[in-house]
Amino acid sequence: MEEKAVLVVGGGISGIQASLDLASRGYKVYLVEKSPSIGGRMAQLDKTFPTMDCSMCILAPKMIDCSHHPNVQLLTYSEVKGVKGSAGNFVVTVLRKPRFVDETKCTGCGICADHCPVEVPNEFDEQLGMRKAIYMPFPQAVPRAMTVDKVNCIECGLCQKMCQAGAVDLKQQPQEVELDVGAIILSIGFDLFDPSQIPTYGYGRYRNVITALELERLLCASGPTGGHLIRPSDGRIPRKIAFVQCVGSRDRRLGTTYCSSICCKYSVKDAVLIKEHEPNTTVSIFYIDLRAFGKGFQVFVNRAKSEYGVRFIRSSPGEIMENPLTKDLTVWYEDTVAGRIENVTFDLVVLCPALLPRTDARELAKVFGIEVDDYGFFKASNVLTNPVDTTVSGIFACGYCLGPKTGDIPDSIMQGSATAARVAEVLERV
Amino acid sequence: MKYAFFLGCLIPARELSYEVSVRKVLPELGVELVDMKGANCCAPFSIQSVDHASWMALAARNLCLAEEMGLDIMTLCNDCYESLLMVNNILKRNPALRDQVNQILSEVGKEYKGKIDVKNLVDVLSGDVGVDKVKGAIKEPISGLRVGTQPGCHLTKPKRIHFEVLRGFNELDALVQATGVESVPYERKEMCCGGPLRDINDDLARQVSREKLIALKNAEVQAVVTVCPFCFLQLDLGQLEVKRHFNEEYNLPVIHFIELLRMGMGMKLDDWEVKAHRIPITELLKDRL
Amino acid sequence: MGEIANTPRGKGILLCIQCGRCSSSCPVARLTGEHNPRRLMEMVILGFKKEVLPTQLPWYCLSCFTCLDRCPQGGDVGEVMFAIRNLAVKQGNTPAGVAAQAKSLYETTRVINPVRTALDRRESLGLSKITTEGLEEVQKILRRTGMEKIVKST
Amino acid sequence: MGEEPRIGVFICHCGVNIGGVVNVPEVVKYVKTLPNVAHSEDNIYTCSEAGLASIKEAIKKHSLNKVIVASCTPRTHEPLFRSACREAGLNHYLFEMANIREQCSWVHAHQPERATKKARDIVRMAVARARWLNPQEEPELEIKDTALVIGGGIAGMTTALTLADQGFKVYLVEKEPQLGGNLLRLHKLYPTMQDTIEILEPTIKAVSQNKNIETLTSTTVSEVKGYVGNFKVALAKNEEKREIEVGTIIVACGAMNYTPPKGLYQYGVYSNIVTQLEMDELLRNGKIEKPPERVVMIQCVGARKGEIRALDLAGFPKSDTARLLAKILKAKKEEGWPYCSKICCMNAIKNSILIKERFPQTDVIILYGDVRVYKEYEDFYSMARENQVKFVKHIEEVTPEIIQGPEGKLTVTAYDALSGREMTLPCDWVVLSTPLIPHKEEVILARMLKIPISPDGFLMEAHLKLRPVDTQMDGIFLAGVSSGPKDVPESIISAKAAAARAATLMANKKMRTEALTSVVDEEQCIGCGLCEEICTYGAHYLEEAKSHTIAALCRGCGACAAECPRRAITMQHFTDEQVLAQVKAALMEEP
């Protein structure tokens, strides 16, 4: 019964939640994901606040549930190209990009990658780690299949020779599939602001100025440094670390006037993680307003102050300067509560960039015929009463692609389930 | 290339060498300068501090004169430049303010129409004349000289009214390099010379200049090249004051960019012009003088 | 705050979220604790007139406009400074240097005038004469804007 | 014990989480020496598809009849490995998990040798227990496709409608005489400034018109019996009692606005000191006729208390600091709630804008600690500033002093941290922003439903991160502010989420439950009833002097088994043999 099928675009945590809710309710779900594996942003995180669960450890089971569920069909490394029809019966065209590996045959043993001669930076590790031209973005990837990155592949054919399963197929062609679905859920997530647009912070020029997501990868046990927090310039363990909030957020000049809603919270979490990694490291957080709203956060912040001795300074630094020899970073800031202008030297500065709409969000919006808001996030049909409905009936959205409506992971999950409910409402009426 | 030449107050009064050099150099590069008869002071920050409407009107009056001449304005002084540029920008975009200003101007039978642009010496040379042509005009390249350039705040800030962040930097440096001189990067190049606080808070003005001088010294430059006559004054005369108050020797000769260009083009400085530098340049440029 | 916010150059003050980027970027504030643009904004917002207008506070700014490029809200601190100064001047708080330039402008159309030797040199070099052409117009304008009063009163 | 045990042990590196500390290969080698171990191997990630594949493969290849995975916590991963066993045709109760990460590698990160030894011990214990494991059958339950929604606020109504629209029958219970909850007291909603009624009325109408919803106002829940899919709920409307049977329960009991005790910030002492909610009402009813000269709002009254704040008075003139410090020292600990109530900043801004709209000349000042206008509410904050509302970050350690001035005016004294100045603010109104707090009845309800309460006093989720609307009780879900402060859209989202979770259960009509339950040996049972007494889940009942277990209710805590004087109660899958074998193995000296 085609009208009982649903399309979910984006395999992050909210997309996964929506898919699982709908699938266990008996709907057929097509989960389309642009990258080679589902998992999304949550997969990139080290630990999650406040339970301090290892992010991957609580996510992986859900990812695998998705791949095992009889009602879920994963279409990874795929993109939606066109949509026809309306609520109850959409016809969606999905482009399956060639991954040059047969998912059904590949066991993900990785022998091919061991022999691949081409090394390139791994996007999943925010370019901090390396991967081969034939690769799996991360060990727990779902589906567990390799992908050939043809941009960097030199066509030496070694992987093909090495693969016992005969899964590598460098001739594989792109493929278009048509799906009949009754409803559509968009959960394409967010991109990050490029801090180099604020030259005075030196991101891209100073090696020891990194983004918070890069830090997550550095802290992560399965990350490029095996969980050892070292600074990029010289591999030394940083003893003085600064976090800078609102890099691109709350910024009228850049047009991102909103608060990204999660930076204060994850910074406090990261600060505590760092303290647990290296107790005698000092961590300072530069903030404008410390936005520790949401369940359990305020108490956690209090603990970060009293138990872990994290320093909170109400200030948005004006400038960061690098010492060309030591690569240490001098941060000029005003402690606005004390009214004192100071400069302190740090080993590592972590910028918390604004969360932005996906670069292809507007494009995608056109494909689905839905509206976007002033920032380019998908527009809710009514911010108060229909927060997960887009402007087209039968098409819903969840997660950060709706804009900073979500505080964090639980909000994304709630939205995922909420869209599942809306879909059911629509389809049960049909 | 023809411009309404806005001299301002400081240069004709205190830095004649600047004026003379400009009048010598630019025609050589095919730039015709027409003096603005009856122009008034640009209305610099000091005047802006006193009264907003007066600033607008006085600047607008100058703009009107140029409109009557049918020429874009070329300024030398950063203060003049920013003042006229800002007012021109505001009045072009903001009809309400434009009406207000025109009401005031009606008193003197003038009307601002927004028909001309405001440019600065650096714009003209790097934009209209072109670095290559400038380079071509250099007969005796000045080699083996390391300088730090001081474009001055109002050639570069605020971003929104100048084309890009370091515009003044890149273009001025390109021009300076064209004369054969090496322009060395130094810390806080964007920083102000301290001049604007002269006569308001001399002590602070000095301290700011000192910061600048220290940064320049650290970069081991032999001289400072300025565009703005205020920067020149503050770093040249100011250096003596810094010396007096902090008894610190910097001995950094300060040179008008245009003088550099003039020398490169083989036109020597007169004796009085050389003497006009309070930090002697003779040592540094002996073979030029 | 209203008095400032309602002037063309003072609007920015309404956008200020007191983040401190201006103060930590300000070359003067880095040198002396007396000057703190962020704090000055706060005092103006909260209407601490007595503590601001008659004092030195409005007169530390270099107008180097570094803050204009750094303020995330486009609060234009350096611009607001002029709105504050205009108000201070109205209350008779005008530094001697500024007053002198204003006076000179009113009397000669220019804020700085050449000394004798300079005039002589101009002549010997055959440079254009420094005249007060346009003075009448300038004075008319300043009369209309009310600056004439200010000049005469200081 | 049936056939000879053939145990397979899979030891996980978990990347470097375990492998970076514990010498995994060595443990594998050691395990192979243990009796009944037929196969052992290590995996980089046993939870990865490859890992699971190799488990299935080994079960067949080595005809294993017991499987052990030594890795992380069963809480997240046991279901995964169990299903792997099932897929390989092995009853999943023949699976045992040994936690050598949380309980070993993570806590002994700096002592690899000893950690490795401990890992050996833990696995050895698991093996000992595994020998005694038996297959179990999971009882299948019918799930009634009827839901009970407790609370008729916006969240409760939304849940009810969402379920009803999907064809489920819903009982909507509200203790007040009318539907609407907290929103009934609200005038306008931020950030759209919509009239609350525009949202409330259509919703209430939709509820009353929906034939799948039975609305029961002035009604409370007096007792909850039964279990997921089959709850028996006693409702009380004054005297009249009624019992209904439902498959799922959604708790949307809401929260209430904290009213400060008389005297806190002079509340209740002067009539022109009110809470934001009261101000909202005053504005709605046009109770404020003459334009106030100034209104002062104070944030976090009764919220974020007991928090440590960095205090630096350097910004203040020397003359003030001494006095300030003295005040701080004698400032008595203010009563209140530890958390940030999330919505107060926006509420204050909303009211300040409403005041400015009505009385443009009025000076509105908001004393805050942090302006927490998250999401796009930042724009709402800007809007307020552009309306010349003034925001003052005051030194919160010093409770603003409020004294009465001439003709009923008030004077607030506070300290502006950002200008380092004392502010004396004559004003006509003082508005206190107070947090949302849990209802008193919530505790009773929670006990009735057997769901725990989080430290902040709100109902607790099954997992704060991953299961935000589930509870630890199957079939019971949380919607709206019952689990913590939320604004309207967030409440609606959580309501729909809860509906989705409940619908999923009910749509399947059936579910399987854990076999980990207590079984009574009727021969041994003397019907003393101790088990019935001790059981917190009401899983035991006496019939004909014998105790019986309701499997679906039993959480397998084992309290009854421990209590039973006759050892008549066995915990399935946690038998004495199994546990004792584990203990012995733990105490045994390594060969």
Image: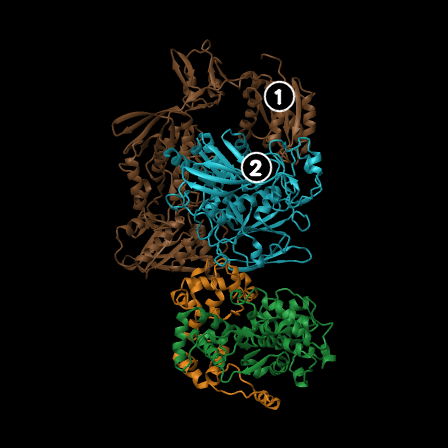
Which chain does tag 2 point to?
Answer: A
Residue A382, horizontal then vertical, whole percent: 38, 46
Q: Give the colour chain D carries in the figure.
A: brown
Q: Give the colour chain A carries in the figure.
A: cyan
State left or right for residue B49 relative to residue A153.
left
Residue B240, horizontal then vertical, whole percent: 64, 77
Q: Dot 2 corresponds to which residue?
A: A56
Q: Is residue B2 above or below residue D331?
A: below
User: Can you tell which mark lies on residue D59?
Assistant: 1
Tag 1: amino acid? Ile
Residue at 62% in and 13% down: D4
Q: Secondary structure at mark 1?
A: helix
Crowding at mark 2 (Cα within 10 Å: few <14, some 14-19, many 20+): many
Name the quadrant containing residue D47. top right
Residue at 69% in and 82% down: B268
Q: Give the colour chain B carries in the figure.
A: green
Residue nearer the viewer, D438 or B139 = B139
Name the quadrant containing residue D410. bottom left
Tell me the quadrant of the picture where the C terminus of chain D can be found: top right
Tell me the quadrant of the picture where the N terminus of chain D can be found: top right
Q: Is residue A67 above or below residue B129?
A: above
Q: Which chain is orange?
A: C
Residue D545, horizontal then vertical, whole percent: 39, 11
State left or right for residue D581 relative to residue C96.
right
Q: Secondary structure at mark 2?
A: helix
Q: Tell me the mark number nearer the camera, choosing from 1 and 2.
A: 1
Residue nearer the viewer, B78 or B30 = B30
